[in-house]
């Protein structure tokens, strides 16, 4: 799909259904160019009092450690707790094999990663704990401001699933979880915040600024006409479906304009409307925009919604090929039956 930049008030007459629309708030809302003082933004961000870094032999622990170092140097981290898993019997046997005969593709082990962290700028703020039981993860995550975790490595072509501990943090705590999906190339520079225009995204934007204080933040809403898929399956003429889709686009544009008015003009740089399916199009748009961090709001904590594939935040965290920050909606606004914060 192609993209075009238009003031929000002109979306009705000029944008064809099915095309993505960028709402440039410098023209549509504030009427002036955005000027964000990165140094001032960095100073204004509250400190991360306690960062929990979960290292597992199967979950890209070296990438997680690298991201923790970057956060420690770029953001204000007061204390970091490194949580490691105890070795299984198979792993103990594996470690008895001479290093030269091990599979080099396995990369550095957790002990090596710990030594790297202890030699980093976080060294004087690190404490190390070993995970003995599942309750340890929940306790430490609840006591922390932010949790870092990797994603389990699988065969090429398969979705990379979240590990057991990462899923436990998402379901049983309300601590934000940053899933590190690939080797960090530096601090996050381009952040994509997904919204359904109904869920409060203030926590998502605030955490995006805390994790990536110097990044450009883009809002994304993926819209779709009501029962659009069923209309196509029922053989409704394409012209009527396009008209139905245009109505959904107009409604989305108005909703995005209202959302932008609720936030400080300096917190986000632009907003994007895209037609499609929430999970796949959020992931695809992030790639097109070369975003290095996706931020989503989680509204439910039900395991069966995840099992049915209906949890948008969980599916994005599982499928995206870039880092994903999952922030929980305020408890007072959360409903067990409500969908996640992306449509």
Image (cartoon, grey):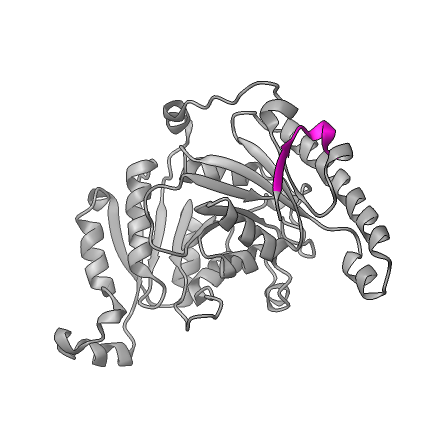
Along the line of sight, the residue nearer the viewer: 221 or 68 = 221
- The structure residue drawn at horizontal position 36% and vertical position 64%, both measured from the top left corner, is 59
Task: Note whether residue 326 is visible.
Answer: no
Is residue 262 rendered to the left or right of residue 57?
A: right
Q: Is residue 185 above or below residue 160?
A: above
Q: Quadrant of residue 279?
A: bottom right
Q: How many labels does the image show?
A: 0
Residue 63 in the image, given as x and y percentages of width and height: 32, 55
- The structure residue drawn at horizontal position 57% and vertical position 18%, both measured from the top left corner, is 32
Along the line of sight, the residue nearer the viewer: 32 or 73 = 32
Along the line of sight, the residue nearer the viewer: 20 or 98 = 20
Residue 19 in the image, given as x and y percentages of width and height: 68, 45
- The structure residue drawn at horizontal position 32% and vertical position 47%, both measured from the top left corner, is 185
Is residue 202 rendered to the left or right of residue 241?
A: left
Task: Note whether residue 128 is visible.
Answer: yes
Along the line of sight, the residue nearer the viewer: 302 or 29 = 29
Is residue 127 rendered to the left or right of residue 189?
A: left
Residue 6 in magenta?
yes
Residue 203 in the image, given as x and y percentages of width and height: 54, 39
- The structure residue drawn at horizontal position 72% and vertical position 33%, both measured from the top left corner, is 11
Name, please, the residue furthest toward the top.
32
Residue 80 in the image, given as x and y percentages of width and height: 30, 47
Residue 50 in magenta?
no
Q: In this view, does 205 lie above or below 108?
A: above
Is residue 15 rendered to the left or right of residue 74?
A: right
Magenta region, residue range: 3-11
Q: Quadrant of residue 264?
A: top right
């Amino acid at each position: 799909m192609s993209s075009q930049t238009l003031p929000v008030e002109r979306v009705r007459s000029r944008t064809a259904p099915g095309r993505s629309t960028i709402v440039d708030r410098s023209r549509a809302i504030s009427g002036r160019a955005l000027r964000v003082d990165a140094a001032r933004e960095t100073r204004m961000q509250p400190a991360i009092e306690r960062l929990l870094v979960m290292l597992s032999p199967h979950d890209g622990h070296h990438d997680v450690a690298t991201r923790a170092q970057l956060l420690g140097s770029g953001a204000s981290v007061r204390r970091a707790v490194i949580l490691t898993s105890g070795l299984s019997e198979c792993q103990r046997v594996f470690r008895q094999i001479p290093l030269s005969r091990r599979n080099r593709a396995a990369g550095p082990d957790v002990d090596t990663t710990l030594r790297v962290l202890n030699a980093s700028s976080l060294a004087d703020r690190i404490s190390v704990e070993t995970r003995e039981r599942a309750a340890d993860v929940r306790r430490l995550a609840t006591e922390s401001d932010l949790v870092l975790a990797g994603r389990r490595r699988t065969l090429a072509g398969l979705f990379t699933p979240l590990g057991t501990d990462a899923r436990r943090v998402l379901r049983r705590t309300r601590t934000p979880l940053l899933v590190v999906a690939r080797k960090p190339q530096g601090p996050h520079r381009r952040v994509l915040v997904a919204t359904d225009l109904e869920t409060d995204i203030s926590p998502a934007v605030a955490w995006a600024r805390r994790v990536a204080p110097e990044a450009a933040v883009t809002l994304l809403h993926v819209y779709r006409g009501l029962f659009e898929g069923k209309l196509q399956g029922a053989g409704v003429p394409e012209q009527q479906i396009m008209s139905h889709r245009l109505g959904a686009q107009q409604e989305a544009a108005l909703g995005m304009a209202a959302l932008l008015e609720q936030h400080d003009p300096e917190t986000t740089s632009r907003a994007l409307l895209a037609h499609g399916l929430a999970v796949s199009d959020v992931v695809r748009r992030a790639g097109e925009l070369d975003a290095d961090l996706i931020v989503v709001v989680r509204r439910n904590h039900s395991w069966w919604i995840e099992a049915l594939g209906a949890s948008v935040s969980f599916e994005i965290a599982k499928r995206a090929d870039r880092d994903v920050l999952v922030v929980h909606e305020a408890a007072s606004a959360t409903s067990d039956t409500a969908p996640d914060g992306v449509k």
